[in-house]
Amino acid sequence: MHEMSLVAGVMRILEEQATSQDFRTVKAVFLEVGALSHADPEAMRFAFEAQKPGTIAADARLEIIESPGQAWCLECSDAVTISRRGDPCPRCGGYKLTVTAGDDLRVRELEVE
Amino acid sequence: MCTVCGCGQASVEGRDSTPAHHHHDHHDHDAAHADMHARGIPHSHDDGHIHYGAGVAGVSVPGLDQARIVKIEQDVLGHNDRLAAVNRARFAAEGIIALNLVSSPGSGKTTLLCETINMLSGRVPVAVVEGDQQTSFDADRIRETGAPAIQVNTGKGCHLDAAMVADATDRLQPGEGSVLFIENVGNLVCPAGFDLGEAAKVVILSVTEGEDKPLKYPDMFAAADLMILNKIDLLPHVRFDVDRCLELAHRVKPDLPVLQLSATTGQGMHKWLGWIDDRRDALLAARAAR
């Protein structure tokens, strides 16, 4: 359940931003979770609900934006979409893939007051 | 989507689907109720639905909405990554090669480490960071080899992070030219995303585990720089298809180098030591060239 640590990272970002951007309350957190990232969206939700009481995000909701996995197929010499690591190229069925995107885990924006 | 409260019209499979937009009485909400909408607090309507709709509606409700959107674009792991970068710079400056060893519990990591230390003994200085939820059993085993070791107990934590490694390194003070082995918590999931500042992540799998683990736990194998297949002396006694295991590992990471060895019998250990030596020589040469 490393998502607890990841959400602790989200909370740290919120506290830092509250100081630098001058807000007191977070109403919503827009979090991008890539399909190939190290986080499970449901576990992130669970950890967020567990950690938010008593913080500036006590009443905030977590909006998860799921982004697709992208890879470069060496056989096809083209960009393809994959849903998991270890999946074959959807075109040629091969596995000579290099992940190029969709492994992000980032706070994109906040709705604040 | 409702343009005032932002609620969607999601349904749960198997539930009775009633009118398309269930909170038709929307604009008669009192202030407290509207506030619940604005804040996204789940609450019940007269129609018996629990209502999760809320949010960035794109429309401002006078007197209720002082919200603003702040674009920040920050990596959740950014803080750990910055600390890892500090560790990495320190290791490079001090000529320390740090190896992050990851595996399931029971893959033989500690035995591999003890044997490796014995074989490096007298030739290469070694220090060890041992990560476990609790006990200092592993650090005790390492200390018996004569190498300095620090046990990091993560408590309820499931992985080491860069700050823990920084603290442990401060205490260990590995000398120039040292190999710093970081034995991560036995876990093939959680440690994958946490950079410690290591020169390489080494994933260890043993033939007493499932040959399909690379595909079951792809994040770790994708993050690894080297895979060690351990306990190969037991191959005659277990059902483990080495070729299939390697094929699955290479599906996840096509160029992942693999070393097959047995820490118990010593078979294949020289290749592992050669790999460490090559890495260490390259690091020290790069440092000397600066």
Image (spheres, grey):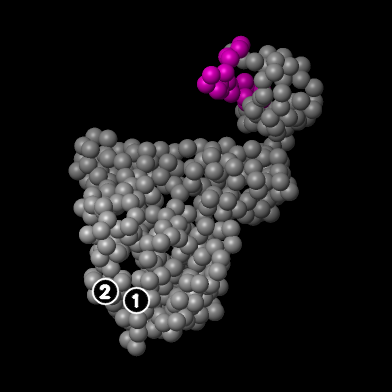
Which quadrant of the structure image shows residue B259? bottom left
Residue furthest bottom as drawn: B122
Query: Of residues B236 and B154, which is closer to you in this image?
Result: B236
Q: Name which of mark 1 and mark 2 comes first in the sequence.
A: 1
- In this picture, residue B134 sits left or right of residue B190: right
Graded by Cα atoms within 10 Å as few (under 14), some (14 to 19) or many (20 or more), the crowding at tag 1 reads some
Tell me, for residue B266, which label it has, or none. 2
Q: Is residue B13 magenta?
A: yes
Range shown magenta: B1-19
Q: Chain of mark 2?
A: B
Query: Is the C-beta separation of discs 1 and 2 under 8 Å?
Result: yes
> What secondary structure is marked by label 2?
loop
Location of residue A26 in the rendering, given as x and y in whole percent from the top left corner: 68, 43
Q: Residue at x 54, y 63 (%)?
A: B133
- One can see residue A49 in this view: yes
Location of residue B198 in the rendering, given as x and y in whole percent from the top left corner: 41, 67
- In this picture, residue B129 sits left or right of residue A7: left
Residue matched to label 1: B115
- Which amino acid type corresponds to the residue marked 1 in the rendered image? Glu
